[in-house]
Structures are given as structure tokens and as C-alpha cells.
Image (cartoon, rainbow, N blue to C red):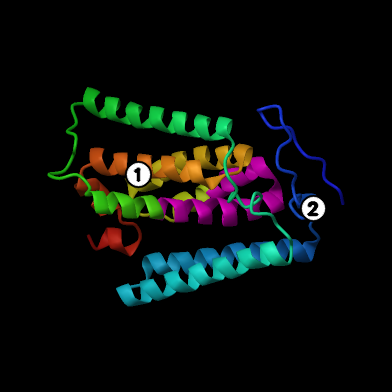
Amino acid sequence: MAVEPKTSPEGTSAIPLAPRVLSLALPAAGRYFVWTQIVIVYLFLEFAIWAPTRESRNRWAAIGAITILVLMLIDVLIDRTSLQRLGLGLPKIFGAGLVLGIGLAMVVLMVILVRLTGGQIPANSTGPSLRLAGGYAIWALLQEFMLQSFFFNRFEELYGGSAAVWMASTLFAAAHLPSPVLTTATLIGALFFCEMYRRYRSIYPLAIVHAMLGMTIAIITPDSLLHHMRVGIGYLRY
């Protein structure tokens, strides 16, 4: 079934949706298959967060990563999903500029709010090192790849873009339980990231902003609340 391309906010033709993207075009078996992918991968990630030992957490993380890569490879080779569709293409100047501009404004706003409420910056004795910041930037890119290229795209196939924004964001925030700071922050951040991805389809500017916001939260939030930005069992054992 042919799908008409949408018109982007820039007035140019947006990325055409692949035939299997529209939820109504998916047969029942196809919908169950997509949901099975979502559930299995999310369970693997939850096991990686909540497993009792570091070795088992690393093992589940590896299993989850391999599963995602295999399913994404199937998207590309069998379903012929384009790299642009997966958010791996180069961003357009307008979309990237808008995402980065809003992200920078959010960073400035958070710092101002901390200053106005009498908070200390950095909130802890030392701020993150350059090595930790670089590592977190890579992790931010991987998180956006999982959130957008895998989960958002599949929710979009099932229910369309607007619903996918909320569903993927809620799933992403739930993965940061039981940290109250990160669960709240990631829900708000993911709503922004997913909406920008829906509009402009590139994970690279999102990853930059994700890293900016994450490092800002690490700097302005006391570690007694943040627990070294740990989630799952790591948060409880801090």
C-alpha cells in the first residue's frame, strides 16, 4: 500500500513512511510480532538493571544489545527500512538547530532555578571528570538509539507517531525506577526527545542534548538523591 509523504515544518517533503509503518496496515500477526519484540527486549533490559550480580547484569545487557542489533538488521535487510527512517541519517540544519537551541535553554533554565533556590553548583564536592563526561556522551547516543530507533519506531508502527511519543517515553522513564529524580527527568526529557525525533528523524542532535541535560542533572543534584545516576538495583544498593 503506497503511503503519501508528509510535509515537514521546513516546507520540504519529510521522510516517507515505509509501508509497514502505518498501524492500520499491519495484520494481526504482524502486530503481535512487533509487540513480542518490544516485550522481549524490554525484559532483557530490565534484567540487566535488576539482576543481583554485576556479572549477570552484564550478561543480560549483552543479550539485550545483541537482540536489538539482530532485529534492527532484520529491519534493514528484510523490511528494507532505510537508515534515515531509523534516525541514523544526517540531521537537517533546521531540526538540529531547534533541538540544540531548546536543549541549551533547558540547561540554562535548570541552572537558574538551582541558583534561585539557593542550591550549590556543583552540588557535590567534585563535578564529573572529562573521562566520565565522554563516556556518558556515548551512553546518551546508545540510549537514544534504543529509545528512538528501536522502541519509538515499533510503537509508531502499532499506534502512530503521537501515541508512540507517550508510550516510548513512559517505557523509558520506567526503566529509571526507583530513582525519583531520574524517573521524573527522563519522562519529561523523553517526551521532548521523542517528539523531536518524530518531526526531524535524527538521533544525533538528540544524543547531544541528552548528554548535556544528563551532565547538568549530575552537577546540580546532590548525590544523596541521585546515587551516582544509578537505577534499578544499583540505586537501592547505593
Secondary structure mainly formed by the magenta segment: helix
The residue under the point 59% across, 62% down is 38
Going by the picture, which residue comes out furthest to the right?
1
| Residue type, label 1 | Gly
Q: In the rendering, at what x and y percent does residue 139 appear?
A: 40, 55
Residue 169, percent across and down? 52, 46
Tell me how many marks there are: 2
Percent across and percent down for residue 16 are 75, 44
Residue position for label 1: 214
Residue placed at 34% from the left, 52% from the top? Answer: 136
In the picture, the quarter occupied by the C terminus is: bottom left
Q: Residues in magenta?
A: 139-168
Q: What amino acid type is highlighted by mark number 2? A: Pro
Please say if 82 is above or below 206. below
Residue named by callout 2: 19
Q: Which mark is residue 21?
A: none
